């Protein structure tokens, strides 16, 4: 670890793995360029000849089938080139979409449809102009390989070249001296320079030729794919927003209904009981005490209902102790025996933990109300896709995510969190609910 100006510099040598990758890539790029020139010559001859004949014979109508054959010929060469470009760029080029005639179309329809396809014409343009980058790349690759191999092996073949008295070598012309030793050292030095720059030069010209091919043969297709992915992301975001709004509205309606049907009615009765007790204190103290005792019981029941409703909003145990403790408490309150499989997991994002809790809570509620099950199994599993939540019972089945069923709101809540909910519930075969939630 040498020190330069007080700073320690670590020099990391090339490892055997990186060296082997460099040599492998050098071989790939070299064969790509060397094969590219003869393929380019064949392609340009066939494409230019076919295009010229097709255009020239259009007045005789036969030119259209000739153009059709030329287009498909260019497609074939383009498909071959996409396969060759893959190892150079380290990616698989997507196969583009080509226009096709509808099944049952006539001869002329099948002939004209490919002629209106933009990617087919781009394939033809590549076939005509690919000779330019191929020639440049071929010249550099041959020159650098010849310079490297020839220079480094000068000592092996220098003796075989005849030299007359009036023949001057390059070192002598440059004023470096005359003689076999000087000549060999000079050529070996040049060979070393070519060898040291061989990989970047070959890599550069191979990328030049490969990127030219990629731009014409898959550029439009890749642009379409990016636009499609952007539209999918936009639609997915809109769906999540819609699902979030729907889930929130459903939760608010349910909370309003539960408060109206439960605590609100009990509070009204409590007010009436206290009013009656107030009138009974003067005339019948015993009846007044009984009424107050009943009012206290109503108060306790109201508090229990409010606690139950608060668990549906933000259960304190989930906030304080995490998902594992909250689901354990949820299973303990279930009237159907619950088999829990909960791995040791770290705290997750608040929205993920809340959604997992509601999935399990709603599923257990539906099991208790509708399934007539004797046992339910709840499992959590963290994978590369996110948090997988599975709730499976042995009940009567028949559950559905269709609109109007109880699980619709739960599906909206899962979708709002960026996840997906699936339900498998054949009649008389139990219900399996699976939710997958992304983990940020």
Image (tube, rainbow, N blue to C red):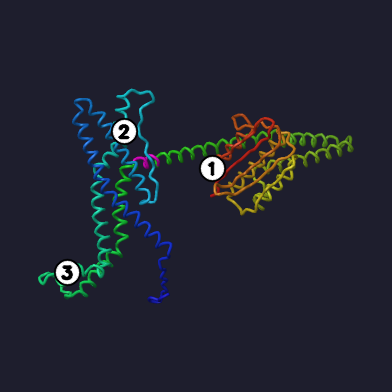
Q: CA distance from mark 3 to mark 1?
A: 71 Å
Find numbered disc 3 in the image and state the secondary structure of the residue it sits on. helix
Where does the image place residue 249, in percent across and percent down from the top left? 59, 35
Camera-near label (3 vs 1) is: 3
Placement of 317 over or under 272, stated as above or below? below
Mark 3 or mark 1: which comes first in sequence?
A: 3
Q: Is residue 305 left or right of residue 229?
A: right
Point 40% across, 61% down: residue? 20
Where does the image place residue 243, in percent across and percent down from the top left? 55, 37
Circle 2: is it few (<14), some (14-19), or many (20+) Cα within 10 Å?
A: some
| Magenta extent | 220-225
Where does the image place residue 76, in percent across and percent down from the top left? 32, 39
Q: CA distance from mark 2 to mark 3?
A: 56 Å
Viewer-proximal residue among 355 and 254: 355
Magenta: predominant secondary structure element? helix
Which residue position is annotated with label 1? Answer: 418
Please state, as top left, top right, bottom left or bottom right, where the N terminus lies in the image: bottom left
Q: Is residue 327 left or right of residue 61?
A: right
Which residue position is annotated with label 2? Answer: 117
Placement of 95 over or under 191, stated as above or below? above
Which residue position is annotated with label 3? Answer: 170
Circle 3: is it few (<14), some (14-19), or many (20+) Cα within 10 Å?
A: some
Q: Is residue 21 left or right of residue 328?
A: left
Residue 174 numbered tag:
none
Point 37% across, 26% down: residue? 102
Find numbered disc 1 in the image and state the secondary structure of the residue it sits on. loop
Camera-near label (2 vs 3) is: 3
């Amino acid at each position: 670890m040498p020190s330069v100006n007080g700073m320690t510099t670590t020099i990391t040598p090339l490892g055997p793995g990186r060296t082997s990758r460099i040599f492998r890539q050098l071989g790939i790029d070299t064969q790509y360029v060397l094969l590219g020139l003869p393929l380019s010559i064949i392609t340009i001859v066939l494409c230019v000849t076919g295009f010229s004949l097709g255009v020239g014979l259009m007045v005789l109508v036969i030119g259209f089938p000739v153009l059709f054959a030329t287009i498909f010929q260019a497609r074939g060469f383009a498909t071959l080139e996409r396969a060759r470009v893959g190892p150079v760029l380290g990616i698989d080029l997507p196969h583009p979409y080509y226009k096709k005639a509808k099944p049952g179309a006539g001869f002329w329809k099948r002939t004209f449809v490919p002629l209106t396809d933009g990617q087919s014409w781009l394939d033809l343009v590549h076939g005509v102009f690919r000779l330019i980058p191929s020639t440049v790349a071929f010249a550099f690759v041959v020159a650098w390989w010849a310079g490297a191999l020839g220079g480094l092996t000068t000592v092996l073949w220098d003796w075989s070249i005849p030299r007359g008295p009036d023949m001057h070598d390059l070192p002598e012309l440059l004023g470096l001296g005359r003689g076999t030793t000087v000549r060999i050292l000079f050529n070996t030095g040049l060979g070393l320079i070519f060898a040291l720059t061989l990989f970047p030069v070959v890599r550069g010209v191979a990328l030049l030729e490969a990127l030219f091919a990629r731009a014409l043969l898959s550029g439009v297709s890749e642009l379409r794919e990016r636009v499609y992915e952007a539209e999918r992301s936009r639609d997915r975001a809109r769906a999540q927003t819609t699902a979030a709004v729907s889930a929130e509205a459903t939760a608010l309606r349910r909370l309003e209904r539960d408060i109206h049907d439960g605590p609100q009615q009990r509070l009204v009765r409590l007010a009436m009981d206290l009013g009656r007790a107030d009138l009974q204190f003067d005339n019948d103290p015993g009846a007044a005490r009984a009424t107050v005792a009943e009012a206290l019981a109503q108060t306790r029941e109201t508090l229990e209902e409010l606690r139950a409703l608060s668990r549906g909003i933000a259960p304190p145990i989930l906030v304080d102790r995490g998902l594992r403790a909250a689901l354990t408490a949820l299973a303990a309150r279930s009237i159907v025996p619950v088999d829990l499989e909960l791995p040791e997991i770290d705290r997750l994002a608040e929205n993920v933990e809340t959604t997992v809790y509601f999935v399990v809570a709603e599923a257990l509620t539906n099991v208790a109300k509708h399934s007539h099950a004797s046992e339910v199994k709840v499992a959590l599993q963290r994978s590369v896709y996110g948090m997988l939540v599975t709730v499976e019972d042995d009940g009567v089945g028949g559950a559905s995510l269709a609109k109007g069923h109880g699980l619709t709101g739960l599906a909206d809540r899962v979708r709002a969190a960026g996840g997906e909910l699936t339900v498998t519930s054949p009649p008389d075969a139990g219900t399996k609910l699976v939710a997958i939630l992304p983990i940020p």
